[in-house]
Amino acid sequence: MQRRHSLILALGLITTACGFRLRGHQRYAFQTLAVLPHPGGPVALELRRSLGPAVRVLAPGEALTSSQVVVEIVQEQREKTVVGVNSSGQVREFQLRMRVKLRIRTAQGRELAPEAELVLQRDISFNESAVLAKEAEEILLYRDMQSDIVQQIMRRLASIKPGQD
């Protein structure tokens, strides 16, 4: 038991010495945010939910001018392409890709960050005998990519300096 406590203490010291700390809520230089289009696709919906208590997200009926920052999701696209086949021409591997094009600006239209296209891709093997399992895996991979993209957007929002808005 003593040895176990020593190990836990040593592990704690090592992780704090390397600068490790749990990720908390982001700090933003603004208090209000609008996410367009409303309601938008899955990325827009997850972004609204993920912002937490630090920022008030405008409701659908509120005037856009009451927002300090506007995140406009111009395009949200999911792609699936074949990247591998076997000798008899049957699909063995797909590549899943998610593209999100966005703008970050003020309500008056002044650009706070250049228009960006975020692209993520994942490879997935395919097996005809496990079609349902592979469909479920594909859904999970898209959801994972969506969460990654939302986290990237939140980091971009956190990088906006107070003088920019």
Image: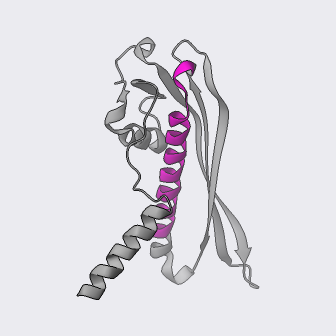
User: How far from the left and from the top, in percent, is residue 6?
Assistant: 32, 80
Magenta span contains residue 48 = no
User: How far from the left and from the top, in percent, is residue 67?
Assistant: 43, 18
- Report the coloring of the rendering: one colour
Of 134 and 88, nearer the camera is 134
Report the label total. 0
Q: Residue at x 56, y 80 (%)?
A: 128
Task: Report the side of 33 relative to 90 (left or right).
Answer: left
Residue 100 image-quadrant placement:
top right
Q: Residue at x 67, y 75 (%)?
A: 91
Task: Report the side of 153 relative to 11 (left or right).
Answer: right
Residue 28 image-quadrant placement:
top left
In the image, is residue 151 above or below residue 51? Answer: below
Q: Quadrant of the N terminus?
A: bottom left
Residue, far right: 87
Of 74 and 162, nearer the camera is 162
Task: Report the side of 3 relative to 107 (left or right).
Answer: left
Q: Main secondary structure of the magenta part?
A: helix
Magenta span contains residue 149 = yes
User: How far from the left and from the top, in percent, is residue 50?
Assistant: 39, 43
User: How far from the left and from the top, in percent, is residue 79?
Assistant: 63, 54
Of 124 and 91, nearer the camera is 124
Q: Which residues are magenta?
A: 135-163
In the image, is residue 110 above or below residue 149? Answer: above
Of 22 and 133, nearer the camera is 22
